[in-house]
Image: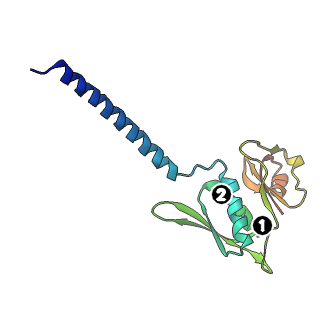
Amino acid sequence: MVETRDILEDLVFAEFASEKWQIKVLFQELENQVGKKYMTDPIADMLIRIKNASMVNHQFVEIPYSNLKHRLANVLLEEELVKGVEKKQSKENKMLKLTLKYKDKEPAFKAMFRVSKPGRRVYMPSKELKSRRGILVVSTPKGLMTSRDAKRKNVGGEVMVEIY
């Protein structure tokens, strides 16, 4: 005959095993998330990668792919700030490969920085679009373009990047 004490011990052990299993599952989930990198501003990351690569005179820079980054890279290509833009795809991920441009071992641009940020969005109508020093890249309803093109098309939008 099974004693009450044996049943109680079995229940306590089952509860302990269940808690241990739940903790193990939670720990594995947290361990999986540690390897993942969550980026709050992928455009700023792209600009930093380009700046860092150009500071050490690299020929190429690879950036994780997105449609917005590809359009921004094409604007840089149109403005002759980079030599080439190529979309590379492997089994795991897509990358954007930019060929950097130099003039006498100096990058084709002096500075490149983010204007509109996730914490502070900056919008301008077409009449106010002008850069103090160089080129503004604007996200408009008609696509990503320079402030010069946006003024010509009479559209305003979010000021993404300033380059000079």
Of helix, strand and loop, which one carries label 1?
Answer: loop
Viewer-closest of 42 and 29: 29
Vertically, is 35 above or below 2?
below
Viewer-closest of 41 and 22: 22
| Numbered-mark total | 2
In the picture of the structure, the residue carrying the numbered disc 2 is: 69
N-terminal-most mark, 1 or 2: 2
Q: In the image, residue 158 lies at what x, y percent?
A: 77, 46
Residue at the left extreme, as displayed = 1
Q: Is residue 81 left or right of residue 24?
A: right
Identify the residue at horizontal 84%, vertical 44% (top origin): 125
Q: Quadrant of the N terminus?
A: top left
Of helix, strand and loop, which one carries label 2?
Answer: helix
Amino acid type shown at disc 1:
Glu
Q: CA separation, marks 1 and 2?
A: 15 Å
Residue 101: which quarter of the image? bottom right
Viewer-closest of 38 and 6: 6
Identify the residue at horizontal 50%, vertical 60% (top origin): 93
Viewer-closest of 51 and 65: 51
Residue 110: which quarter of the image? bottom right
Q: Is residue 21 left or right of residue 3?
A: right
In the picture of the structure, the residue carrying the numbered disc 1 is: 79
